[in-house]
């Protein structure tokens, strides 16, 4: 049986690894400041997560993403007066009550995407076994990344999201027929690019994103797409999102160990 295979990897032209995203809204800054000044710690922590979920689009349980995006300067600036502190605390407490009504993000299967627990382990094992060979720490699963991956996979368009989903790295792979292209095959197709890497002239690839040392979180999804490849049976379309994003121009030496 003839098989069709395709793959794509995203490339970042930024000069630094840590992305700046979703911050331009003054309302978000004010709300986060209020959350930082709430005197009751459980309310403060919950409020910050819910505010971030509401205004930035991330799920409340992704604390590592939250911590990266929360501005340290906002939480380090003290109120100018006790009255300011009181008013901000009152405002944030009121918002805490309203935040209870914000619906949580729906997660298919509890893993962000349609991935089963076994699938999640397959994605993680496939990546981490490769990363271990190149001095990179194990990735952990992130539901927000998985939900973003599922959203893009469901579109059945073999093109990169170009940052529409968030400040993530992204690998794509597709194979037809579906039965011949399981998770392991998709990951192996990316890992096979290792031999093409030249540290003296680094070129971004699926493999470089897989082993990127600064990347710590992963979320993947798959969708069966009937018309992805013209003239072929339905294809399995895999999308993996990575955070922080890899393939950052100028940062290969410290992030990719041959």
Image: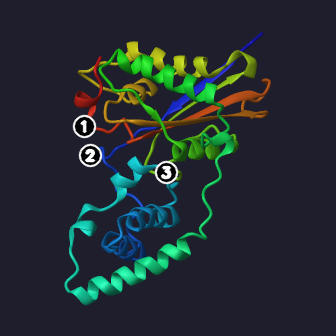
Q: Earlier in the sequence, mark 2 or mark 3?
A: 2
Residue 220: x %, y % from top left: 57, 35
- List the single residue furthest toward the top: 1
Instruction: Looking at the picture, tell me which residue is in the foreground, 243 or 232.
Output: 243
Q: Which mark is residue 15?
A: 2
Q: Which mark is residue 61?
A: 3
Instruction: Looking at the picture, tell me which residue is in the foreground, 228 or 90.
Output: 90
**Label 3 secondary element:** loop
Q: CA distance from mark 1 to mark 2?
A: 6 Å
The structure residue drawn at horizontal position 47% and vertical position 18%, both measured from the top left corner, is 191
Q: Which mark is residue 250?
A: 1
**Residues tagged 1 and 2 counted as in contact (Cβ below 8 A):** yes
Against 2, residue 202 (above or below) is below
Q: In the image, is 122 to the left or to the right of 77? A: right
Tell me the quarter of the image containing the N terminus: top right
Q: CA distance from mark 2 to mark 3?
A: 29 Å
Residue 40: x %, y % from top left: 36, 70
**Residues tagged 2 and 3 counted as in contact (Cβ below 8 A):** no
Q: Earlier in the sequence, mark 1 or mark 3?
A: 3
**Label 2 secondary element:** loop
Number of numbered labels in the structure image = 3
Q: Is residue 75 visible?
A: yes
The structure residue drawn at horizontal position 25% and vertical position 37%, both measured from the top left corner, is 250
């Amino acid at each position: 049986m003839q098989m069709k295979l395709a793959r794509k990897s995203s490339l970042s032209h930024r000069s630094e690894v840590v992305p700046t995203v979703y911050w331009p809204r003054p309302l978000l800054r004010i709300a986060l400041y209020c959350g930082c000044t709430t005197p009751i710690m459980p309310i403060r922590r919950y409020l910050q997560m819910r505010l971030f979920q509401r205004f930035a689009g991330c799920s409340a349980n992704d604390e590592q993403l939250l911590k990266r995006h929360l501005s340290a300067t906002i939480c380090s600036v003290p109120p100018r007066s006790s009255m300011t502190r009181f008013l901000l605390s009152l405002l944030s407490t009121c918002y805490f009550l309203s935040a209870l009504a914000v619906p949580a993000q729906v997660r298919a299967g509890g893993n962000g995407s349609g991935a089963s627990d076994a699938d999640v382990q397959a994605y993680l094992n496939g990546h981490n076994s490769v990363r271990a060979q190149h001095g990179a720490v194990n990735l952990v699963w992130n539901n927000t990344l998985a939900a973003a991956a599922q959203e893009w996979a469901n579109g059945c368009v073999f093109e990169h999201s170009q940052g529409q989903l968030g400040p993530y790295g992204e690998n794509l792979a597709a194979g037809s027929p579906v039965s011949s292209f399981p998770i392991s095959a998709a990951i192996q197709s990316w890992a096979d690019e290792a031999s093409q890497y030249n540290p003296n002239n680094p070129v971004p690839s699926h493999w470089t994103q897989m082993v990127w040392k600064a990347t710590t979180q992963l979320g993947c999804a798959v969708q069966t797409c009937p018309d992805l490849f013209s003239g072929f049976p339905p294809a399995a379309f895999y999308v993996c999102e990575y955070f922080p994003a890899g393939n950052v121009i100028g940062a290969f030496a410290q992030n990719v160990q041959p």
